[in-house]
Image: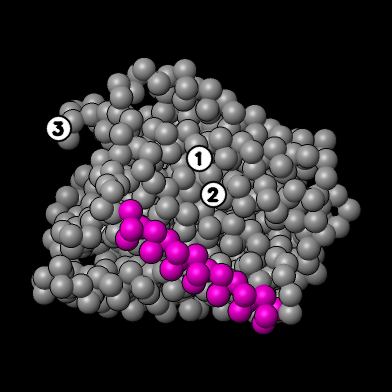
């Protein structure tokens, strides 16, 4: 229950902030007063940074602190970030956003890892433990938009951010009080740095920091000065370059056998599909929030709702639909869809959801759209998530070269990072486009790519015979 409670409150904290961040950034009277497209870009880069920094969080847990201390440090940084946002001043806001992204990156990949270490591979309680753990995720993510949305509406943004800080503080209290129940799991790094490793680590770190400095300087020069925009651009470039660098490394490494190299090639279309899926899926916090706040009737069956309400539809749908999918996969057995077909179906559903958004925008015209349009969109995206997300890490482990298993796990996290980085650039480049054109254009592109992945599915299948079952993995 220690990790269940920790993750419940951590997800409450994360999704609470996610639900109101764009509203805060673009509020002219009580927020930072950014333009709509720049605010959306900042939120997208915040989300991309969480996944990008998850690579760093996994490395610190494996090589330096161990998972338990990395989670503790990450949670503490998150609390500090929320407290910065809770201050009745807009000055510390960007520092708060950066701290929350860093802390979540440290914490995110390691809590679920610790759940796995509590049980031996053959322990029958393992699946039940993960089921309980994911229920905690969904309870936290379902309740947060309601609570934080209410506080934002009644008391203002800073009180709402304070609620997220309280949620994360409760997570840390539960984590510290329940330390004994972890039985020492995650106390030590499994592959600690040695004295011989340190010179290489210093050189690599210096090279990475130098590259980041160059990218930021170039972005600042192109933007005409420092500010949110060059940070958005620089982070986008890093998120684009990182997966390309990973693939080049994997395909050129002498440690990768010819058979493994073929499996890495088979992984590329899956990565592209996941990247585009998350590009659309994660717009719940950006373009869909804007549509909810400015173009949607905030009244559902006679009940007043807030724009934040819609972000609770996905976790609720996961709880309802995941058992249905579990039964379907079990009954289909070997007759079920392959990995490539599941990825393609998930991407297709994401594209359909944006086609529905384009239709909703077109039908509404100058009027407000029914909230049922957005509810339907979130349900369709949840169906796509249930096709693509559970199989993602399974496919990653199957196709990973033996010498680079950990790096392939990091590569999977870079798919949503790159997807949200694309969104950050798109919302700025299409600032003058109508909602109908924006959603419709992305729908067409995504659906076309989905059919390409369908066509490649037999080729992908020849490189893996693994079929993933029913497990649902949290990806947001």
Q: Earlier in the sequence, mark 3 or mark 2?
A: 2
Tell me the magenta residue range: 198-223
Q: Are marks 3 and 2 in contact (CB under 8 Å)?
A: no
Check the image and report above or below for 323 versus 98: above
Please tell me which residue lies in front, 359 or 174: 174
Residue under numbered circle 1: 74
Give the prevailing secondary structure in the magenta stretch.
helix
Tag 3 residue: 122
Q: Earlier in the sequence, mark 1 or mark 2?
A: 1
Q: Are marks 1 and 3 in contact (CB under 8 Å)?
A: no
Element type at mark 3: loop
- Let me know if residue 400 is in the magenta part: no
Quadrant assignment, res 9: top right
What residue is shown at x 57% (from left), y 40% (from top)?
77
Mark with earlier residue (1, 3):
1
Q: Relative to residue 307, is residue 358 depicted above or below?
A: below
Residue for point 27% across, 47% down? 194
């Amino acid at each position: 229950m220690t990790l269940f409670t920790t993750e419940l409150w951590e997800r409450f904290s994360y999704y609470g902030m996610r639900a109101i961040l764009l509203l805060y950034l673009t509020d002219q009277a009580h927020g930072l007063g950014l333009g709509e497209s720049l605010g959306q870009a900042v939120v997208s880069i915040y989300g991309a940074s969480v996944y990008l920094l998850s690579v760093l969080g996994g490395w610190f847990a494996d090589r330096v602190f161990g998972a338990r201390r990395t989670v503790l440090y990450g949670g503490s940084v998150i609390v500090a970030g929320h407290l910065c946002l809770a201050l009745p001043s807009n000055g510390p806001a960007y520092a708060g956003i950066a701290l929350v992204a860093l802390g979540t990156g440290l914490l995110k990949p390691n809590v679920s890892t610790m759940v796995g270490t509590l049980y031996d591979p053959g322990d029958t309680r393992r699946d039940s433990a993960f089921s309980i753990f994911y229920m905690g995720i969904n309870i936290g993510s379902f309740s947060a938009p309601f609570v934080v949305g209410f506080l934002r509406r009644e008391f203002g943004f800073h009180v709402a951010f304070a609620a997220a800080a309280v949620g994360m503080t409760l997570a840390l209290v539960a984590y510290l009080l329940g330390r004994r129940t972890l039985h020492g799991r995650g106390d030590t790094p499994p592959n600690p740095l040695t004295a011989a490793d340190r010179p290489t680590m210093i050189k690599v770190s210096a090279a990475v920091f130098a590259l980041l400095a160059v990218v930021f300087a170039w972005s600042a020069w192109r933007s005409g000065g420092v500010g949110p925009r060059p940070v958005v651009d620089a982070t986008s470039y890093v998120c684009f370059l990182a997966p390309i660098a990973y693939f080049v490394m994997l395909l050129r490494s002498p440690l990768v056998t010819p058979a493994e190299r073929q499996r890495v090639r088979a992984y590329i279309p899956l990565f592209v599909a996941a990247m585009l899926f998350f590009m659309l899926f994660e717009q719940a916090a950006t373009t869909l929030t804007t549509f909810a706040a400015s173009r949607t009737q905030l009244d559902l069956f006679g009940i007043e709702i807030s724009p934040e309400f819609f972000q609770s539809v996905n976790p609720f749908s996961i709880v309802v639909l995941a058992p249905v999918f579990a039964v379907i996969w079990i009954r289909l057995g070997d007759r079920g869809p392959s990995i490539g077909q599941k990825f393609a179906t998930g991407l297709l559903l994401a594209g359909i959801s944006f086609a529905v958004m384009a239709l909703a925008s077109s039908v509404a015209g100058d009027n407000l759209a029914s909230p049922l349009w957005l509810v339907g969109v979130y349900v369709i995206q949840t169906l796509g998530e249930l096709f693509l997300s559970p199989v993602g890490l399974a496919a990653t482990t199957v196709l990973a070269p033996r010498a680079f298993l950990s790096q392939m796990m990091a590569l999977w996290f870079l798919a949503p990072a790159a997807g949200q980085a694309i969104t950050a650039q798109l919302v700025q480049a299409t600032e003058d486009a109508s909602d109908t054109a924006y959603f419709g254009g992305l729908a067409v592109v995504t659906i076309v790519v989905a059919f390409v992945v369908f066509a490649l599915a037999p080729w992908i299948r020849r490189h893996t015979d693994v079929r993933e079952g029913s497990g649902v993995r949290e990806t947001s």
